[in-house]
Amino acid sequence: MKKLMLGNEAVARGAYEAGVRLISSYPGTPSTEITESAVQYPEIYCEWAPNEKVAAEAAIGASMAGGRAMSCCKHVGLNVMADPVFTVSYIGVNGGLVFAVADDPGMHSSQNEQDSRHYAEAAKIMMLEPSDSGECKEFTRRAFELSEQFDTPVFLRLSTRVSHSQSTVELQERSGDEIKEYTKNIPKNVMMPAMAIKRHVVVEERMKALSAFAETTDLNVVEDHGAKIGVITSGISYMYAKEALGDRVNYLKLGMAYPMPAEKIRDFAAKCERVVVIEELDPVIETFVKALGIPVTGKEAFTLLGEYTPAMILKAVMNEDSAPHYVQESPIPNRPPVLCPGCPHRATFYVLKKLGLTVSGDIGCYTLGAAAPLQSVDSTICMGASVSAAHGMAKIRGKEFNKKLVSVIGDSTFIHSGITGLIDIVYNKGANTVIILDNSITGMTGHQDNPATGKTIYGEETKAVDLVLLAKAVGIERVVVCDPFDVKRFEEVVREETEADEPSVIIAQRPCALLKYVKYEGRCKVNEETCRKCKMCMRIGCPAITWKDGAVKIDTSLCNGCGLCMNICPFGAIEKEA
Amino acid sequence: MSTKNIMITGVGGQGTLLAVRILAHIVQEMGYDVKVSEVHGMSQRGGSVVTYLKYGDKVYSPIIGLGEADTILSFEKLEALRCLPYLREGGEIIVNDQEIDPMPVITGAMEYPSDIENTLRAHAKVRLVKALELANEAGNSRTANVVLLGAMAAAGNIPKENWIDALKSTVPAKFLDVNLKAFELGFASGQ
């Protein structure tokens, strides 16, 4: 049976067919739908973990216990899970173990553009790289077989265009889901120096075996069209190259991104007059090929930045132009992402901006608090850094600065890695104010439950982390829960807490406007008689509120009736439609 | 058959993904090789959203380059203009007659272009659809995406019954009637 599937859905299908028993992940675009889609298979136990490190460790434990297991993340999530990943490379597996990591060239939804292939080399872990949904499914299956065959974890490397493109997948039956025996094995599973020294030897032997395997595996495919130019490529770049160059060049498609096949590359290059390496992001293949003494055209003809396109490849390899096209006659307004109409974060940032505070930001929808017109957020680094970076800022700039400084962090992000920063503040006698933006969901990645929501990935009721008790338990004595839509009170609370000489946590509580149960009555409209055109309502950056023909208008097709603008209007000139 | 390239564009939250999935379903049922490239995550939050759908005997790249789109289906006027460079010579644009101000316009940094329709008509075959109006006429403003699919169906050469079948198998039962009505209104407006 054939089915059109997203790359991510196909990875989940591959895991199902490979007999996977457990998937533990933390959501992250563009990897999220792998785990979400796996929930449909009752044979696989799925969960959202508090962060990627915990998720990877749960998968490692499952593998050690004899079941096939997987953990999925985005490229920056791999940084968080790196610690256990580097060491499980030494331990190896019992049940097959796969880490699926999705890179985001072009940064559609990420804070950096790192190339995960470096991790494969650094951690000495084999890496497979599919090019479309069909390969996503097939390579996932193969990854589990290879994991057990070579006693190694395996990376499956995806990218946005592979993860979020749909193409045809051939479905097969599930197999290989028997749980292997568990036996205590201290030399293999306890990584203290005496054992690890010996396991490192095993890892290096395995690397030799994998390098030999790379020479013969059908994951690495040569397409010989009798051409003079040879293209070495992998992943989505292969599809772009095929579209741009067709059968006018020969291809070496590396389905196994690490380790690479030296002899196969030498043979391929020997039959071509010119070798071109086509790979997005870093020159990983190029560096390897050049180290073999083979001259290649690589990054000098392409770029280290962003995504590639077939047109770019056609120009770089053949010096041919693509189709003629219209060019904009004058600049047109861009349309950056914005906080949704009804978003609770809008009220929070309105107040923080009004008070002129320095805002240490974090990763989530609320990163958009840095965008015009709110422009409230001062910095964004990575998950959890809002709390710990503000601690460092306060230590350098002192008490008075700290009274004008807050951290903002979402509920899910706080659980992920904000709590450790909060402990740092308490333990090291800081006096920071941390605002937890508790919208009762993981918003940006598309509404996943998390340990603070009280629901599992299956929607089942479970214990919810009590954020108030959690903050108190680590030593925060000033904890205030406040609805940011109660703008007046919220402003007072922020003033008081930033003024205090001890650390405090404000839990800004209001659910995400996109949650199904969030319904506001009626739509807002401007009373043109009482409106004084002060444009105060436009300062909140609601996409439904615009200025047309000398008056403020509210677009009823966008307004969700949250009423924040009514709270802010000093003249009571915004009311609900009758 | 050589590959057909369709771009679907709009503002995050307008329902472009559903429209794409219906279209993908149709061409797959017709036996073509199909690739769809979607955008998820941050860019969906009220930003410009572009989805590519390609079908033919064999499709490699899931993305569409400048000057390569046969058809652009745009849920918003400014987004149609933004995507115009992707249209091939002689290509067609089906565009919703709706203007949504982007943030630079709301903040007053830029103006919403006033002559979009003329610019589009100077470079493409254009069908302007009052999708929101027709969706309201059908009974639900959220069916504007299906109105636009109706207009697209009228413009193209995929049999109408394939569209109807696809709606029946992708739209939840309780919303089917209103969506079928929206499709018919869009179809009539596109003829």
Image (cartoon, rainbow, N blue to C red):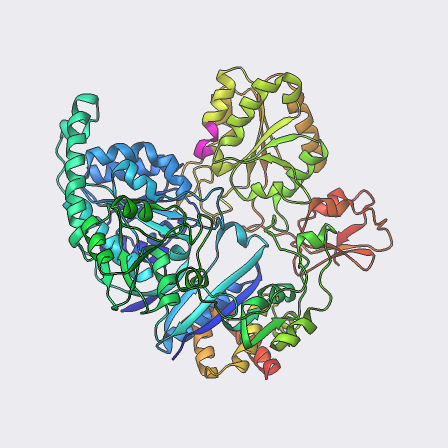
- Name the magenta segment's main secondary structure: helix
Q: Is residue A213 visible?
A: yes
How far across and how far down the image is residue A447, in percent? 48, 48
Query: Residue sitting at 26 percent across and 32 percent down?
Result: A87
Say whether residue B72 is left or right of residue B97.
left
Q: Is residue A40 visible?
A: no
Is A96 included in the stretch rendered in magenta?
Answer: no
Q: Quadrant of the C terminus of chain A?
A: bottom right
Query: Compared with residue A192, is residue A254 higher up or lower down, i.e. above or below?
Result: below
Closer-to-camera residue (A308/A290): A290
Q: Quadrant of the N terminus of chain A?
A: bottom left
Query: Residue sitting at 34 percent across and 77 percent down?
Result: B31
Where does the magenta region start and end? A415-419
Query: Compared with residue A106, is residue A249 higher up or lower down, i.e. above or below?
Result: below
How far across and how far down the image is residue A27, in percent? 42, 45
Q: Residue B49 lies in what quarter of the image?
A: bottom right
Say whether residue B130 is left or right of residue A527.
left
How far across and how far down the image is residue A79, in percent? 38, 36
How far across and how far down the image is residue A123, in percent? 28, 36
Closer-to-camera residue (A147/A203): A203
Query: Compared with residue A5, is residue A386 higher up or lower down, i.e. above or below?
Result: above
